[in-house]
Amino acid sequence: MRVPLDGLPERVTIYEVGPRDGLQNEDTIVPVADKAEFVVRLADAGLRTIETTSFVHPKWIPQLADAAELLDVLPRDPDLRYPVLVPNERGLDRALANGCTEIAIFGSATETFARRNLNRTIDESLEMFAPVVERALAKGLWVRAYVSMVCGDPWEGDVPIDQVVSVSTRLMDMGCSQLSLGDTIGVGTPGQVTALIEAHAAAGIGADRLAVHFHDTYGQALSNTLAALRAGVTTVDASAGGIGGCPYAESATGNLATEDLVWMLHGLGIDTGVDLAKLVATSRWMAGRLGRPSPSRVVQALSPKE
Ligand code: HMG
Ligand code: MG
């Protein structure tokens, strides 16, 4: 039943990260033909922005070492956006050689995760990103920035909001169009999310330029999403079936499941353009490929009982 709540947007853009954030952290390396089918089925279910892969060092993320082959076989459609993760100029060169028009750089709010994920200090990682963004913008690419560990860090504990805003500001000052706030280990709660968004607005990064990226480790992702929507955010990252995590962040589990997000948004009368039945069928199919059931509650609830 659809029952709206005041103060929420009429439409939400879902930024699907399953093929990238989901598959990067699965033990199974999915063959490129299955990855392509996954992306095609997600698009057929109505998702329009699908982060497909990453051009990072293949030794760091072997699950996505086939980025070039995947992009080569994906159908191109002007309505479909396929952003890819790029950490450095080598990654940008590879993305450009494969026809990418949208990229995402990914910074960290904490020193420990910057070192573990990028082999750099925060300052060094920002130095690494600067020429990537400059060259990408000069070529007319759309550039998103992620900032990770915005609600807490497994090694450093609580992360002060000022520290997050400082990294966010330096990333956005490079000229990125969108900033995705990553609760990489899923520890945040709604008051913290509201405070983060307000602090970004006070620093000149309004909710219209923010996306939220919640991992569901502590079961808080949907509550946090509702808090973000109330604070004016209209782009929400999610992973079909709730697959994934981050191999360089201890205790991170999968993202907010796209199905769980769609169930809540549709219940609130918020338009997403997503066909939930097709999406659930896609996640059930991918769960078969991965050899483990989907952790999404909505996928489980809408699946026939065995
Ligand atoms: P490094 O070892 O410091 O690299 O790694 P380097 O710059 O010293 O280069 C060493 C060699 O790697 C060189 O080759 C480079 O050419 C090569 P050599 O000259 O020795 O033959 N190289 C590359 N090859 C292919 N593609 C590249 C590339 N770059 C260098 N792009 C590096 C630094 C950044 C590359 C590494 O740390 C890395 O790849 N990290 C990526 C880790 C990652 O992908 N993590 C998961 C994504 S982040 C995430 O999931 C969080 C997020 O979801 C948000 C959230 O939840 O918070 C986004
Ligand atoms: Mg993530």
Image (cartoon, rainbow, N blue to C red):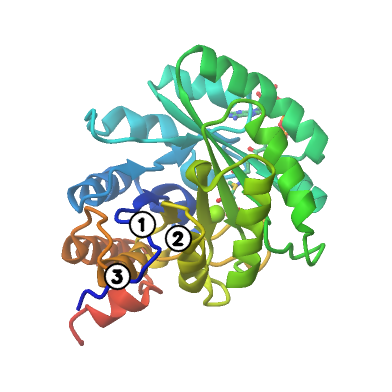
Q: In the shown orientation, is residue 267 left or right of residue 44?
A: right
Residue 1 vs 206, above or below: the answer is below
> Residue 11's x, y, as percent?
30, 53
Nearest the camera: 191 or 111? 191
The residue positioned 30% from the left and 61% from the top of the image is 286
* Residue at mark 2: 229
Is residue 204 or residue 54 the one in the foreground?
204
- Give the left or right position of residue 246, taking residue 280 as reference: right
Question: For residue 196, what is the image quadrant?
Answer: bottom right
Please name the amino acid that badge 3 sits on: Leu
| Residue sticking out furthest to the bottom | 305
Q: Element type at marker 1?
A: loop
Residue 125 position, x and y percent, is 74, 34
Q: Which numbered disc covers residue 268?
A: 3
Does 34 appear above or below 145? below
Relative horizontal placement of residue 293, taking residue 254 as reference (left or right)? left
Query: Could you say where residue 199 lies in the image, as x and y percent from the top left?
Result: 68, 52
